[in-house]
Amino acid sequence: MNEYDSNRILDLTKKINYTLTINIKDSDCYVLNTCHIREKATDKVYHEVGRVKKEFRYKKKPIVLIVGCVAQAEGEVLLKKEKYIDAVVGPQSYHQINKIILDIENKNTKINSTEFEVIEKFDQLNLVKNSNSKISSFLTIQEGCDKFCKFCVVPYTRGPEYSRSYPEIISEAKQLVDNGSQEIILLGQNVNAYNFKNKRLSDLLYSLSEIKNLERIRYTTSHPKDFTDDLIEAHGECKKLMPLLHLPVQSGSTKILHNMNRNHTIEEYLEIIDKLKEKKSSIKFSSDFIIAYPGETNDDFEKTVSLMKQVDFINSYSFIFSARPGTPAANLKKIDEKIAKERLTIFQRVADEIKKKYRNKLVNSITNVLFENNARSTDKYFGRDEYFNSVIVNSNENLAGKIRNVKIDSCNQNTLFGKVILESKPNEYAA
Ligand code: SF4
């Protein structure tokens, strides 16, 4: 979402004659868009500002703006602790960025803009054309969260759930396709909670499918609690919707899910998976896991490992629980560090084995790849298959923006390597 926001900030600032520079030393205004989800996010901000300070030691200082979730969470503290920062701008206030920059230019003032003005933000953004021209583009359709999982800062930094206007999303999607995008990834903290005048995510998927030259649609991140039957149905019906679903589960134990305030059981999660497979047999899944959440027993942990094996997640993101200041879970007693590390190692070994087995099965199969760009050297091209696997091929033809069948020759943990072939892809992977 920060990538989408950064592009939109650039679109906005063009209106006051700012443009993108790739060399930090040339900048008159430095915008650091921050994420608060990982550990030590605030320290990284101070470190980054220190780097800018060093670059400009003998030059006129640029305007320095800290935007995004760290700005929202820390606000005034950042301004007080680091005088080099001129303004902090929360994720729901960045539509005011031009006024903020002009005020700093003219009045040399410090600004804290961290209100939740999400409606106003999108009203303003809808007036500015999205100039992103990447082959695969993000498009925010929903922001914020009302779920209040006990470990998470998002409800405090992004505010309550808000769904963008349906016609505005369709219009922005058409702009992106006109700019050259062939894949759109719909974004939201709770993307499947999308609800604009009773139009749901499933309705959007059908409408977007009708856009000519839009070849692929994905969405992320969804919550099991909001996974309604109409959305499951859409996975069977929408041919442009890609067959990989990222559905965070966090733990394989219903007891821990309850303690986290996730509001669903493991049985309910597995029911969603089964229903999706019924509608689309080729669908595969990825997920997020928190290992060693406070109160997790060995039995709870074993359940998480079993779930990993049962669902056969082709990708997973796993971390040891780490407390976020201000969240309810921050006050809970942590699991012993040694045990937590051991559990993460065991879990990741299982996850890696599943991934390795899946990728090895892809060798010699044919996969359908949307190519995005050159990969380092001119005759190497990077793209993604339908399951979002990175694929690299050698080719004399410029493949950027093309969809081609690729026979996979080899793979490593992160990338598949192959060659473009003319024969058509069988309906499903050999896997
Ligand atoms: S649903 Fe997602 S964004 Fe919302 S509180 Fe839970 S983890 Fe955070």
Image (cartoon, grey):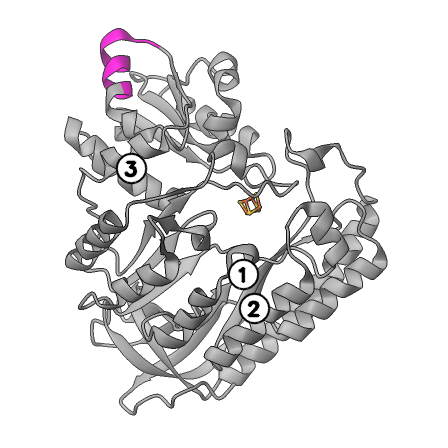
Residue 234 position in % (x across, y down): 39, 70
Left or right, residue 51 beside residue 327: left
Dot 2 or dot 3, earlier in sequence: 3
Q: Nearer the viewer, residue 205 or 338?
A: 205
Question: In the drawing, what numbered circle is on residue 122?
Answer: 3
Dot 3, how many residues are within 10 Å of its Cα: few (below 14), some (14-19), or many (20+)? Answer: some
Residue 133 belongs to magenta span: no
Dot 1 or dot 2, earlier in sequence: 1
What residue sits 22% from the left and 31% below the top?
13
**Residue 113 position (above or below residue 311):** above
**Residue 330 position (above or below residue 221):** above
Q: Is any atom of residue 426 visible in this view?
A: yes
Q: Which residues are magenta?
A: 100-109
Q: Amino acid at mark 1?
A: Leu
The answer to whether the residue labelled 1 contacts the one labelled 2, judged by CB atoms less than 8 Å apart, is yes
Q: Give the mark count.
A: 3
The residue to which callout 2 is attached is: 272
